Structure formats: structure tokens, C-alpha cells
Amino acid sequence: MNDLSARKIAEPAAVVAWRRAAAEAAATTTSDEGALELVELFFFAYRDFVGDADRLLENYGFGRAHHRVLHFVSRRPGLAIAALLEILRITKQSLNRVLKQLLEAGFVEAREGVLDRRQRLLYPTPQGAKLARDLAALQTARFLKVMDELPPAARGAASEFLFAMIDSDERERVRAHLACAKAAGAAP
Amino acid sequence: MNDLSARKIAEPAAVVAWRRAAAEAAATTTSDEGALELVELFFFAYRDFVGDADRLLENYGFGRAHHRVLHFVSRRPGLAIAALLEILRITKQSLNRVLKQLLEAGFVEAREGVLDRRQRLLYPTPQGAKLARDLAALQTARFLKVMDELPPAARGAASEFLFAMIDSDERERVRAHLACAKAAGAAP
DNA sequence: CTATTTACGTCAACTATATTGACATAAATC
DNA sequence: GATTTATGTCAATATAGTTGACGTAAATAG
């Protein structure tokens, strides 16, 4: 029932039907009704997207908050507290509780900054890096499957679409952040 | 700074640069690194997407939970409790707190089911319908702006992409739900 | 060199959203 | 008449967040 290889064969009926409906709805311009559908689709898509990781996190006694911290620390090793707070948009008090747990459990470690010794730069431990990879694998698997299901022409569009959904005054920051993460990920 | 009309002219630099990068990254197949970027873009996009509504909800002393209930009740008037619980994937105890507040504040009303008198069918009051419209307007505005920024060929792809992101065994349900909401919305 | 600012930690009280578990009621159904 | 179903409710608990106040060490401005 949950077999991935079977899905490709068993499921396209809904996808095909949807593709037709979507194409009709968005043929020329997007209507208000079409936009309302997108609102709901976005809600359902995000719900299922985070659901994958939630189930794995339970085994470690962690929640979504831990996941987000571990993810961004792993993607950007050497991240300072302030930078992390800005990404997550939470208060330092809220971060501190989950971060402390990750530090104590040995999934993240903090090193004194070399340029600025007030900073505590965050790094994943080997254990933390492994969990981050496992979590990321679940989520990238969903995207890779989606890309496989989508017609090739629509693949780049997904990325453009998501980027356009971000507040315009935040996009540069996000782009810089992604570039930084890409550089960090390429090294080891 | 937050002027919508100005954005169209002031902002496309980032969008254009991104479009090129996205096209390159997803030219043939989507790599693991590309999928990781999508994971983060999805996070940031959702964060900003719900942020709009959050600010409006504050004026009413409501939170996201109230928003979700009000949204689905407004989109599907006559929704039964059990159906709403399945959509939201929360427990009835959790729903009850939020729903009670919406009922007391006069944004939602419950009527006894005619076919099954055990059911409490939920309807938005005129006041609730107005708030739901205002909230939806914020979110559809974001989508409409995005669709405007995107090349026409990419517009249908957004909908397809989001639909494909939903758990495959949930898609039929979502599709049915959307069809129902569309029918309800078309009437008045 | 002193004064201020910055980066961070921490204690405390509180809110919002969710959970599990147990029990209650009325209506529908077998 | 017995059971299942749709819903409500009380209680305890967990998670994730908030505001506000205060502390400390290091960087930086005067």
C-alpha cells in the first residue's frame, strides 16, 4: 500500500485528471477561485511534507523545532546564533530550549568564534549530521518523486514558483543563504 | 516599501537571476542538491504565506488554528465535525477549544443535521464569512502576484506541483474536497 | 581607557496548540 | 434492546512559542 515502486504505476489516474483540470483552470490567467484552490493545495502539501519527518523525529524524542535547528545548522555549519534566529524567526529564549537539548544529546556542538569570540558557532556532530541526512532524505525523496511525476517542462517551474512565494524583500537573503549552503555542502 | 504596485518594477532582478539558476539546476533531472534547495524554499515560502494571515488574525485575538477552521467552514458550509477533524488532522478536543471560541464570538454557527440529528453542521455567520474572505484575499493576492510574475507556461505547473506534493493516498480526498468547495463557492 | 554596544545566556511567567485517556449523551442502526 | 456513531467535556500533559527583565563577556566607539 505504501510501496514506492508501485505508486508510479498505480496512481497516475488522479494526476492525469488533475493535470487536465489545472491546465483548464490556469489556461490564461489565474482566477480568484483558482487561487483559493492553490491556498488549500499549499496547506495540504505542506502538511504532508512535514509529516514525513515528524514520524522519524519521534524516535529521537525530538519535534519540528529540533528538526529546523538541526537542518539549518547542518546545511550551514558554523552558523551563529543570531543568524539562526533570523532564519527561524523565533526568539532566542525559544531557540535556547531546543538548542540546549540538541547540544546535550550530542547532535550539535558550539565552538567559540575565531573572529568574534562572543559568537557561538554551531556545527553538527557526526551523529547530528547523520540524523540531518536521514531527515533530508525523506523530504528530498518526496521532491524527487514529484519531479519524476511532473512533465519535464514543469520541473524548473516548481522552484521558480516557490521562490516567488517568498516575500520579495526576503528573496535576496534566501538566495544568499542557499548559495552559502550550497558552497558548504559541496566541500566534504 | 510595501507598495504592491512598486514591486513589479523594483524587484525582478532577483527573480530573473533566480529563474536562470533554477533552469540550470533543473535542466535535465533534479539533483539531490536541487531537492535540498526545494526543501528550504518550501519552508520559507510557507513561512511567509501564513505570515500574512497571522498579522490580520491578531486584530481579532485569533490564531492559526482559528484561521484553518474558519477557512474550511467557509469554503464548505455545512461541514460536519468529523469531516473537519479529518481535514485538519487534529483531535476533537483540540478542535473544540478553537471552535467554541469561534462559535461564542459569532464567526461560526452550528446547526443540527437534518438527515442525522447527531451531527452539528458548521456554517460561517456573515461576520465569519467576511473575515474568511479578508484572510483569503491576503493569501490569494500572494498567489495572483506570483502567477503574474511567473512566465505563463509555469502557471499551471504550480498547481500540478502542489498537488503532486500531497501524499498519493490523500489526493483523491483532496480533489473531492476541492470540487465540493468549488461547487459551494459558485452558488452565492 | 572608559563607555557603549553587541552576542549571547538565563530565569520567570504566560499563551497557543496540540496530545492522551476517560467518561457522558443522544441519535442512528443492527 | 443492544450497539455503534457523532459529538461534548474534564483533566493532565507536552511542545513551541511569547514578553520582560537581568547578567556577562567581548567588541567597538569616543
Image (tube, coloured by chain):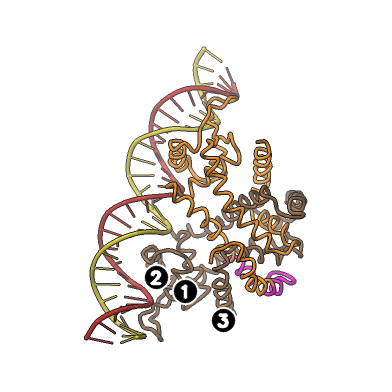
Chain colours: A orange, B brown, C yellow, D red
Q: Main secondary structure of the magenta part?
A: helix
Mark 3: amino acid:
Pro
Taking the image as shown, residue D16 lies to the left or right of residue A149, namely left
Q: Earlier in the sequence, mark 1 or mark 3?
A: 1
**Mark 3 belongs to chain:** B
Residue that appears at 38% across and 84% down: B116
> What SS does tag 1 mark?
strand
Q: CA distance from mark 3 to mark 2?
A: 23 Å
**Mark 2 belongs to chain:** B
In the rendered image, residue A38 lying in the magenta stretch gets the answer yes
Residue B159 in the image: state x and y as whole percent: 66, 66
Instruction: Give the position of the C terminus of chain B as an image quadrant.
Output: bottom right
In this view, the residue in front, B74 or A182, is A182
Residue B123 in the image: state x and y as whole percent: 45, 76
Residue hosting label 1: B124
> What SS does tag 3 mark?
loop
Q: State which quadrant residue B176 falls in.
A: bottom right
Check residue B103 in the rendering and tell me which mark sits there, or answer none.
Answer: 2
In this view, the residue in front, B107 or D25, is D25
Mark 2: amino acid:
Leu
Residue hosting label 3: B188
Q: CA distance from mark 1 to mark 2?
A: 9 Å
